[in-house]
Image: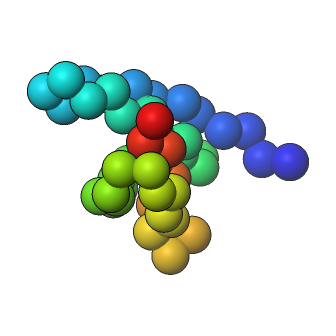
Amino acid sequence: MNAMNTQEQNDGDIKKTYFCKDDVKQYITSYPGRQETNGGKGCCRYHS
């Protein structure tokens, strides 16, 4: 298992949680209720 970093950012009234691998700082945009990965290179954003 790889260590996962968790980052939270506020976008208006929406709270976004990013799960990033290693030192990857590249975030992606996703739609509400969806989880997407940036080609396994970026971060996964879980929109709740």
Rendered view: 37 above or below 27? below
Image-quadrant location for residue 16 = top left
Q: Residue at x 19, y 23 (%)?
A: 13
Q: Residue at x 57, y 69 (%)?
A: 40
User: For this view, does 40 lie left or right of residue 27?
Assistant: right
What residue occupies the far bottom of the structure in this picture?
A: 39
Which colour scheme appears in the figure? rainbow
Where residue 43 appears, as percent x and y from the top left, is 48, 53
Where residue 26 appears, as percent x and y from the top left, is 35, 56
User: For this view, does 23 lie left or right of residue 8?
Assistant: right
Where residue 32 appears, as percent x and y from the top left, is 35, 50
Q: Which residue is drawn at 59% across and 49% down?
A: 21
User: For this view, does 4 lie left or right of residue 48?
Assistant: right
**Can the viewer see residue 43 in this picture?**
no
Where residue 48 appears, as percent x and y from the top left, is 46, 35
State the residue in front, 21 or 11.
11
Q: Residue at x 66, y 38 (%)?
A: 4
State the residue in front, 48 or 3.
48
Rendered view: 30 above or below 48? below
Rendered view: 22 above or below 40? above
